[in-house]
Amino acid sequence: MTVTVANPLAEQVYHRIKDDIFSFRLLPGDNFTETEMAQRQGVSRTPLRDALFRLQREGYLEVGFRRGWKVCPIDFDRLDNLYDLRIVLEMAALEKLCSQEEPGAGLEQLNAIWLVQPEDRLADAVQVAELDEAFHTNLVAAAGNHEMTRVHTEVTEKIRIVRRLDFLKKKRVDATYEEHGKILQLVAKRRATEAQILLRAHITQSKLEVRKITIWMLAEARQLQEPEAVPALR
């Protein structure tokens, strides 16, 4: 059996371009040619094309005959659907967690992170965003359903492009600590219905905040972006 080994350079380019998209250095609607992007990345066309087609398969880029590549617009309806799917998966996980006799090690680790005094909470938005994603991922994983965890991980990856924007406001950081802590306390008391109600409200509020912030952030980024700052894009 032949094992295909990923091109390390293509892997690096893939992650760099994806990070540019996630950080809005490449904005939805931006166009570029392979020659322009190869110069920008300092690589040849072969590893670049591998990276670009991988991003196309994942839904971040689109390519047209004789018109080069384009960063896909943010599909808010699709994001709403993904958030709704995330709610379904996490509520099912809570139901299962509350039916277990003993909490697993995964829940104990989450308690150590989120059930802390206010003065011990992190304030850095990037760190809290990463911890928030890990909270929800590990909450589902702790339920022990591997297929549910796999699907949830895929959903998490697809919404990551906008999800971390939820933490641009200090009040959202504080609210995340409060709500995560309450959810964990309700799970410990096996109060599944109350935990599910809080979880649904928690994710729905995040979805609404992200949508508002994303629209504002994209408009500001487009306004501030100067042609000479990104000469390879048009």
Image (cartoon, rainbow, N blue to C red):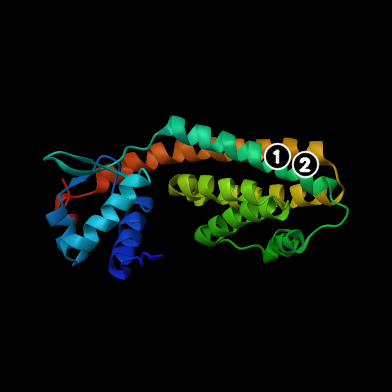
**What's the distance in space between the residues labelled 1 and 2, CA to CA?**
6 Å
Look at the numbered disc 2 and give the secondary structure of its residue: helix
Instruction: Tell me the crowding category of disc 1: few under 14, some 14 to 19, or many 20 or more residues within 10 angstroms, Cα based.
Output: many
Q: Position of residue 99 (x, y in %)?
A: 84, 46
- Picture quarter containing residue 18? bottom left
Please state if 176 lies on the left or on the right of 227 as rendered: right
Comparing 95 with 200, the one in front is 95
Determine whether 13 is above or below 147 in the image. Answer: below
Q: Position of residue 209 (x, y in %)?
A: 52, 39
Q: Can residue 76 be seen from the camera position used here?
A: yes
Q: Could you tell me which quadrant the N terminus lies in?
A: bottom left
Contact? badges 1 and 2 (CB < 8 Å): yes
Q: Residue at x 32, y 52 (%)?
A: 54
Look at the numbered disc 1 and give the secondary structure of its residue: helix
Please state if 62 lies on the left or on the right of 156 as rendered: left
Determine whether 38 is above or below 66 in the image. Answer: below
Comparing 32 with 169, the one in front is 32
Determine whether 214 is above or below 8 in the image. Answer: above
Q: Could you tell me which quadrant the C terminus lies in?
A: top left
Please state if 92 lies on the left or on the right of 169 as rendered: right
Q: Residue at x 19, y 66 (%)?
A: 43
- Which residue type carries mark 1? Met
Residue underneath mark 2: 95
Q: Position of residue 29 (x, y in %)?
A: 26, 39
Q: Residue at x 80, y 36 (%)?
A: 193
Q: Residue at x 38, y 43 (%)?
A: 217
Q: Position of residue 61 (x, y in %)?
A: 29, 44
Give me the disc on residue 91: 1
- Which residue type carries mark 2? Glu
